[in-house]
């Protein structure tokens, strides 16, 4: 039986503030195979790592990332009410590349272009990935499939996946037709009949989120998914080793 790769969702976000350098470092220290993170664009065009378009939930500030410069954003504390991590700053994508450079980890970069169509975010992230020489270790995903098609246009070699949540028709066929490498379904989408078989037929990897319970981790292994995206990478690693 093949064992899924373990990708830390927003870093080891079950333990450290999501999408921060401590969360990514913890994931690497735990032995994760990769990290998943979310990217947005600042007012002065810097790619930063944050799940929400607003900073209200995860920092001591308020407002839209798009309305702040990087310097202004760096003044806020992104400890996300986890006070052991007081003073944690919002990371730039470049800082994450630098942190994980020595580790060999994969980075799943999720483009948060659902609500705000950040101008040229696709071009900017591909350029940064190239500048840092990370092309072989990055897979791009997004709920906005137009963004993924743009990434493929800019870099036809880029690894890509379509994110989706609730039941959509024939996702394996759609992924194959649009020539992406992977599907990134919410865990409950694995229930559709023949889903894994259809993905295998089209040679589409299945990377599943958010796989936090032991039962879900075991189910993913039984089904032969490529990667589980989890807030608790240590639990998944321990379970898959046992
Ligand atoms: O990429 C998997 C997962 O992160 C997608 O949903 O909302 O947690 O970014 P979300
Ligand atoms: Mg995400």
Image: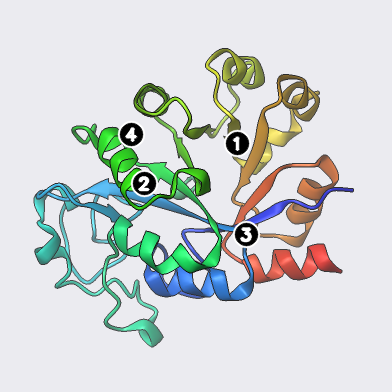
> Percent position (x, y) of residue 144?
39, 29
Q: Quadrant of residue 213?
A: bottom right
How far apart in space, not on screen, are marks 4 and 3 (Cα)? 27 Å
- First along the sequence among labels 2 and 1: 2
Tell me the residue that label 3 is attached to: 33
Badge 1 element = strand
Residue under pointer 2: 129
The residue under the point 65% across, 21% down is 172
**Residue at position x 87%, y 69% in the image:** 242
Side of 232 relative to 151 (left or right): right
| Label 2 – label 3 distance at C-alpha | 18 Å
Which badge, 3 or 1, is on the more N-terminal residue?
Answer: 3
Mark 1 surroundings within 10 Å by alpha-carbon count, few (fewer than 14), some (14 through 19), many (20 or more): many
Residue to which mark 1 is pinned: 185
Q: Earlier in the sequence, mark 2 or mark 3?
A: 3
Is residue 19 toward the left or the right of residue 189 in the image?
left
Residue visible at 47% across and 37% down? 141
């Amino acid at each position: 039986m093949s064992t899924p790769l373990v990708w830390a969702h927003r870093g080891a976000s079950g333990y450290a503030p999501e999408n921060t350098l401590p969360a990514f470092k913890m994931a690497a220290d735990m032995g994760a195979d990769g990290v998943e993170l979310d990217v947005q664009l600042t007012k002065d065009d810097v790619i930063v790592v944050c799940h929400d378009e607003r900073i209200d939930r995860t920092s001591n500030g308020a407002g839209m990332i798009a309305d702040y410069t990087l310097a202004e954003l760096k003044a806020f504390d992104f400890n996300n009410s986890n006070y052991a991590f007081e003073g944690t700053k919002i990371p730039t994508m470049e800082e994450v590349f630098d942190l994980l450079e020595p580790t060999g980890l994969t980075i799943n970069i999720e483009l948060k272009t659902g609500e705000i169509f950040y101008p040229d975010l696709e071009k900017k992230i591909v350029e940064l990935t190239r500048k840092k020489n990370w092309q072989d270790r990055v897979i791009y995903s997004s709920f906005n499939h137009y963004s993924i098609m743009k990434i493929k246009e800019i870099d036809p070699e880029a690894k890509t996946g379509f994110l989706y949540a609730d039941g959509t028709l024939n996702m394996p066929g759609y992924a194959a037709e649009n020539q992406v490498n992977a599907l990134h379904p919410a865990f409950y989408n694995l229930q559709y009949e023949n889903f894994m078989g259809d993905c295998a037929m089209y040679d589409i990897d299945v990377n599943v989120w958010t796989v936090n319970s032991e039962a879900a981790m075991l189910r993913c292994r039984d089904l032969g998914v490529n990667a589980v995206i989890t807030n608790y990478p240590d639990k998944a690693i321990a379970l898959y080793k046992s």
